[in-house]
Every structure is written in structure tokens, then in C-alpha cells.
């Protein structure tokens, strides 16, 4: 992978007071970014651990130190706002466009190390990897949907650049870019931001998808994701919107009340594989999807999770890049809770048919 920034984008790399990396991304010409972090910070606490569940083969991260992380501070104490008026935050500059920094309370951190547990039942090791925070804007009261296309493209470039660099770190298996929005989701900081996890293992959902993709290729000789996208575009009942290079649709077996998948028409393994036409069109379609989510219930901003699925190392020919966007809200005054069936058995029960969800998302077009 090559960490290229394909539009005129300036990248400034610096460090925070405790040694963590901070990166500013700016559209157009370089902006002076020489502000220094003046906070008296101790080294960040790490100490996470990964443990293998012998019954499922899934890795679980144990990160007890995160209990002390910042939780829903008032706006005037937000650590993601710029440093202004004598108040120092995680961003030393008094303004910024997009900023990415290492999380002070990471679930995963550090280089890979040997796993322990020769009996196969208690396999564990240090929680190696990296966790980063992506600040989409300096405006505390904004959201991603409020960005213009130029800024959304800058975020896409930042995601791409970080994917390339993190995937090249020793021991990294998968890079995951995502956004949680809304207190209902469990967001601890209200400022518009997302996160990036560089995992030392393949996540369970990705492992299941790549296994299904391999089975489909063995049975048909074709890509599962090419066939899936072609079938949805041909059917049309669940297509929400489409451009020349991307299509957004509600999946046939959607798990969430309102769930949309956004696929590039030309299959790529990860964000670094997108070409310029795909990059140029993405901001318009993605922003429209987010704004439609906000219009669904007439109750302000809709809580959601936005998740980029990228191929893990060694599976570039099987898993195709796509974005999944979903909300846990099923009505203006009702949330979809993962109770006994979903949490206990991982067997989802959807309260809304995918076809009705797609129709509703088409109806709220401007």
C-alpha cells in the first residue's frame, strides 16, 4: 500500500507532550502548524491484553485501563476542540481542518509480541496495535453531515493515508475506520470525530465474510461481493441512491432497522485502491446518506455507526471494500436494543423489512 494523498492535501506530523503522534490534514496549500502541546502529561497508560476464545476462535481485547478515560465532559472542557483562550486540549493549534492523533486511552498499543498458552485453552498476549482518533472539524457543534464535500473528501484522504501507514506496521492484520455518533451509541465525546483501529488479528465479522467469500468463489469462480452488488443493482427494490461509481442499498438480510451498505462499482480491497473518480464522487453520496438518516425521524440527529470494511492482510482478493451505515433507532421514540436473542445468540431479529427501510430512505430525499 502507498500512503498517497491524491488531491492537493497538506500533511503535517508532530507530537504531543507525552510523545503521541498528531497529524494535521489541510486542503490546498500547507498551513503553518507549529503550535506546541504545553500540557504536563504523564506517559499514556497501556497494558491491554488479547485473549482467544477457544469455543469460537474470536479474539477478545481486555483493556481495563480505559475505565479512566474522559467521559462526556462539558463543551468548554472538550479535549477535541482546538486549544484556545489559555485552555489546552489534545489539539495544540487554535484551529484545524482534520486532525488525527494516537488515542491517550487506547484499546490496542505497541508492537506485536509472542502469544502464550500452550494448551490452546488460555491463549493470550499483549494488546498490540494502534488506536487513533480522527477529528473531522474544529466545530464542536457540527456533525459529519454538516461538512461540505471538500472537507468530506479531506477526511476520506486522511482515512486512506492512515490505512496505508497502519497496515504497514509489523503485526497488523486489519485496519478499521469507523464513526460512532450519538449518546445512544455510547459516545463518550460529543465533538464530531471517528476512530481507527489497527488490529493484530482479523476481527470476527471480517473472518466470517472472508470465509463466505472463499466458499462462493470455490462454488462459482466469481467474487461474492461483485455478485452481491450486481444483484442489488439489477433488483433495485433496496437501492437507496446510486452514482456513476458507487451504489448504496439496504442489504437483503439487514440486521438493523435502517442499515445501508455503500459499495464502489469497481471492486477494491481497501481505501488505498480507490481511483480518483471514485474518490471524487464519494463525498456527495455519503453526505446525502447521512442527511437522509437525519431526516428519517424528525427528531434531530440520528445516532449511527459508520463502518469501513477493508480486507485483512492476505485476503485482498476476497473481501471487497464497502461502508456499512446503520442506526439503532427503529422509530422516533424507540431504540433497537440487542437483548437475549441478538446478544446471547448473535441471531438478529429486524423490526422493519429491508424493502420498507429502503423505500423510506428514498422518500426522505431532498
Image: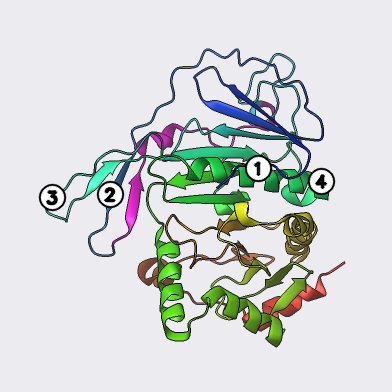
Question: Which circle's residue, 2 or 4, is located before the other in the chain?
Answer: 2
Q: Position of residue 25 (x, y in %)?
A: 70, 34
Closest to the camera, between mark 3 and mark 2, is: 3
Q: Residues within 10 Å of mark 1 (few under 14, many from 20)?
A: some
Q: CA distance from mark 3 to mark 2?
A: 13 Å
Residues at circles 1 and 4 in contact by the CB criterion of under 8 Å? no
In front: mark 3 or mark 1?
Answer: 1
Give how far apart the Cα atoms at labels 1 and 4 are: 17 Å
- Compared with 71, 343 (above or below) is below
Numbered label attached to residue 118: 3
| Residue found at x 33% / y 54% | 59
Magenta stretch holds residue 182: no
Local secondary structure at mark 3:
loop
Residue underneath mark 2:
51
Q: Earlier in the sequence, mark 4 or mark 3?
A: 3
Label 1 sits on a secondary structure element that is loop
Residues shaded magenta: 57-76
Question: Outermost residue toward the right?
Answer: 366
Return the residue at label 1.
4
Earlier sequence position, callout 1 versus callout 4: 1
Residue 128 is left or right of residue 90, and the answer is left
Between marks 4 and 3, how big is the CA–CA gap?
52 Å
Which residue is denoted by mark 4 in the rendering? 150
Alpha-carbon span between mark 2 and mark 4: 42 Å
| Circle 4: element type | helix
Residue toward you, 325 or 311: 311
* Residue 196 percent coordinates (x, y): 54, 44
Q: Residues within 10 Å of mark 2 (few under 14, many from 20)?
A: many
Q: Which badge, 3 or 1, comes first in the chain's sequence?
A: 1
- The x, y position of residue 252, in whole percent, is 59, 81
Marks 2 and 1 in Cβ contact (< 8 Å): no
Amino acid at each position: 500500500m502507498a500512503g498517497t494523498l491524491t488531491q492537493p492535501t497538506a500533511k503535517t506530523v508532530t507530537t504531543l507532550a507525552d510523545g503521541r503522534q498528531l497529524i494535521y490534514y489541510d486542503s490546498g496549500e500547507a498551513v503553518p502548524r507549529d503550535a506546541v502541546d504545553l500540557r504536563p502529561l504523564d506517559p499514556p497508560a497501556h497494558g491491554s491484553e488479547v485473549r482467544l476464545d477457544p469455543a469460537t476462535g474470536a479474539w477478545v481485547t481486555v483493556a481495563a485501563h480505559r475505565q479512566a478515560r474522559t467521559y462526556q465532559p462539558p463543551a468548554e472542557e472538550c479535549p477535541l476542540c482546538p486549544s484556545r483562550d489559555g485552555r489546552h486540549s489534545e489539539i495544540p493549534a487554535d484551529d484545524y481542518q482534520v486532525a488525527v492523533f494516537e488515542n491517550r486511552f487506547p484499546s490496542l498499543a505497541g508492537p506485536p509480541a509472542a502469544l502464550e498458552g500452550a494448551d490452546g485453552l488460555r491463549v493470550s498476549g499483549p494488546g498490540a496495535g494502534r488506536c487513533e482518533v480522527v477529528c473531522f472539524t474544529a466545530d464542536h457543534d457540527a456533525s459529519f453531515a454538516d461538512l461540505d464535500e471538500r472537507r468530506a473528501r479531506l477526511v476520506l484522504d486522511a482515512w486512506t493515508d492512515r490505512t496505508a501507514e497502519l497496515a504497514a506496521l509489523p503485526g497488523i492484520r486489519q485496519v478499521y475506520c469507523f464513526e460512532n455518533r450519538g449518546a445512544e451509541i455510547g459516545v463518550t465525546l460529543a465533538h464530531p470525530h471517528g476512530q481507527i483501529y489497527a488490529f493484530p488479528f482479523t476481527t470476527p465479522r471480517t473472518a466470517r465474510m472472508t470465509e463466505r467469500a472463499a466458499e462462493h468463489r470455490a462454488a462459482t469462480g466469481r467474487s461474492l461481493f461483485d455478485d452481491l452488488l450486481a444483484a442489488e443493482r439489477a433488483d433495485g427494490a433496496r437501492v437507496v441512491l446510486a452514482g456513476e461509481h458507487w451504489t448504496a442499498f439496504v442489504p437483503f438480510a439487514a440486521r438493523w432497522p435502517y442499515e445501508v451498505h455503500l459499495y464502489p462499482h469497481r471492486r477494491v480491497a481497501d481505501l488505498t485502491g480507490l481511483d480518483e473518480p471514485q474518490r471524487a464522487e464519494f463525498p456527495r453520496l455519503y453526505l446525502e446518506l447521512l442527511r437522509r438518516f437525519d431526516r428519517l425521524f424528525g427528531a434531530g440527529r440520528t445516532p449511527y455507526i459508520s463502518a469501513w470494511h477493508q480486507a485483512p492482510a492476505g485476503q485482498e482478493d476476497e473481501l471487497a471494500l464497502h461502508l456499512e451505515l446503520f442506526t439503532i433507532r427503529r422509530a422516533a421514540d424507540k431504540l433497537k436494543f440487542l437483548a437475549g436473542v441478538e446478544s446471547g445468540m448473535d441471531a438478529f431479529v429486524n423490526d422493519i423489512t429491508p424493502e420498507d427501510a429502503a423505500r423510506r430512505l428514498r422518500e426522505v430525499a431532498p
